[in-house]
Image (tube, rainbow, N blue to C red):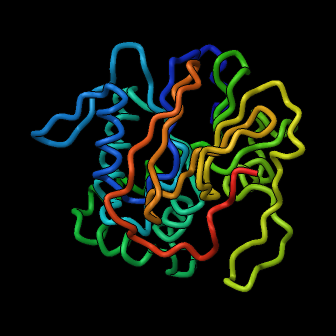
Amino acid sequence: MVLAHRSATGPFDILGDIHGCIDELRALMELLGYDVLASDGSIRAPAGRTAVFLGDLVDRGPDSMAVLRLAMEMVETGAAICLIGNHDDKLWRKLIGRKVQLKHGLAETLAQLACEPAAMQDRVRRFLGDLPSHRVLDGGRLVVAHAGLKTSLHGRETGRARDFALYGATTGRLDAAGLPIRLDWAMDYAGHARVVYGHTPVAEPRWTNGTINIDTGCVFGGRLTALRYPELELVSVSARAPYATLARPFLPDH
């Protein structure tokens, strides 16, 4: 799997965690200048631009299947790059027969997928299995990963790099809510590449040492946010409703 696409210079529209929020996704894409076709809900990119999905397409929100269809079509037509998030990875592991816990919206996603023809179920399985953990873009000046990535792991295809890209840095312990206790890796980041990521919901996009977290918690009633690159312009839409309850507060902006 090729993780370095240094010749791909953009411009890019990088989108944070979607979690099945299809209405907000379509609204944000329209705001970014993408053509949402009313007949089938598919999306055409503005000339020259490429969407980048940071992962966690599924779970918790109202229509994970619609988000998957849209992302698959855009990737297959070259209009988007998609990374795997921890929720997408868990769905994929379930689809290939691994034992996983049906928590945090996975059961609902599986129920939606079960209503689809076998060919679509197989297409989703193959799509998720092919997603990379991260991408190195624009001559090494941009790195995109679901939960971020420290410098030493940029462009590496290893289990350690994949784990970091999916989950970030953790202590190995769980908090009272049963969630991993996370370390703020971005506070120590000193790399030359700008790292754009999500995974940990923040009240506002969080700039730290050349990194930015754009997961503004749409599925929890926050916003769905995109970063336009290289413009570094933030564009967002508000959630239509809170679809899930946040287990711990939004991470503050420092």
Q: Position of residue 19 (x, y in %)?
A: 44, 59
Residue ID at (54%, 63%): 87
For residue 194, which quarter of the picture? top right
Residue ID at (44%, 25%): 50
Number of numbered tags placed on the structure image: 0
- Left or right: residue 143 versus residue 128 is right
Q: Front-most of 156 and 227?
A: 227
Q: Is residue 49 above or below residue 238?
A: above
Q: Position of residue 165 (x, y in %)?
A: 70, 49
- Left or right: residue 220 versus residue 203 is left
The answer to whether any part of residue 133 appears in the image is no
Q: Position of residue 211 (x, y in %)?
A: 73, 37
For residue 249, which quarter of the picture? bottom right
Q: Is residue 224 above or below residue 62?
A: above
Q: Position of residue 24 (x, y in %)?
A: 33, 50
Farthest left residue? 39
